[in-house]
Amino acid sequence: MGTTSFTYLKNVTTLELNPELCTGCGMCAMVCPREVLALADGKAEIISRDDCMECGACAQNCPTAAITVDAGVGCAAAVINSMLGRTGDSCCCVVESDGKKAPPQCGPGCC
C-alpha cells in the first residue's frame, strides 16, 4: 500500500496505545489505511503518529481494546462529511437548505 508524504496536523491525534493490553495480533497494523501502526517485538507500536487521520479502524478491530482514538474528530471526518454535503463547525452538524443549522445528527463513529 505505502503511505504518502502527506501529514495531518502535528501532535494533535487522540490515538493512544496501551502496550500492556496488546497481544500482538497485528489487526491494527493490518487495517490502518495510513500505516501508522506496526508490530515490533511481538507488540503493536505507533510508528507515525502524525499520519493518523483518526478513522478509528485500529480501535474497532483491536480485540483487547489496547488502542483508543476519538474517531470522527480528525481530518477523515471532515473529508467524509464534506463529501456528504455536510457543512458547519462540528462533524455532526448539518446545514439545512434555508441556511439554519439543524440539530446534531450523530451516527456511529461521529462525535
Image (spheres, rainbow, N blue to C red):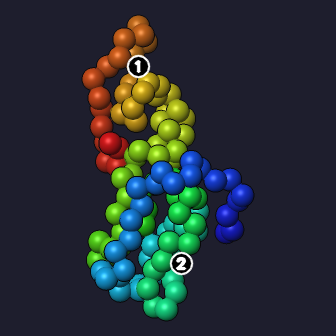
Label number found at residue 38:
2
Residue 29 lies, with reference to residue 71, above or below; the image says below
What x and y, as percent, mark residue 75? 52, 45
Q: Are marks 1 and 2 in contact (CB under 8 Å)?
A: no
The local secondary structure at tag 2 comes to: strand
| Quarter of image, res 106 | top left
Residue 98 lies, with reference to residue 50, above or below; the image says above
**Which amino acid, by three-letter code, is at mark 2?**
Ala
1 relative position to 76: left or right: right
83 relative position to 69: left or right: right
What x and y, as percent, mark residue 93? 37, 28
**Which amino acid, by three-letter code, is at mark 1?**
Val
Front in this rendered view, residue 19 or 28:
19
The local secondary structure at tag 1 comes to: loop
- Which mark's residue is nearer the viewer, 1 or 2? 2
Extreme residue in the bottom direction: 41
Extreme residue in the right direction: 5
What x and y, as percent, mark residue 27? 44, 76
Give the mark nearest the N terminus, 1 or 2: 2
Front in this rendered view, residue 56 or 51:
51
Residue 69 lies, with reference to residue 27, above or below; the image says above
> Distance between the Cα atoms at labels 1 and 2?
39 Å
What residue is shown at x 44% (from left), y 24% (from top)? 88
Front in this rendered view, residue 100 or 11:
11
Label number found at residue 103:
none
Residue count near mark 2 (Cα–Cα under 10 Å), binned few <14, some 14–19, many ≥20: some
> Where's the C terminus, which quadrant?
top left
Q: Is residue 80 visible?
A: no
Q: Which residue is mark 1?
A: 95
| Quarter of image, res 66 | bottom left
> Where's the N terminus, which quadrant?
bottom right
What residue is shown at x 29% (from left), y 77% (from top)? 64
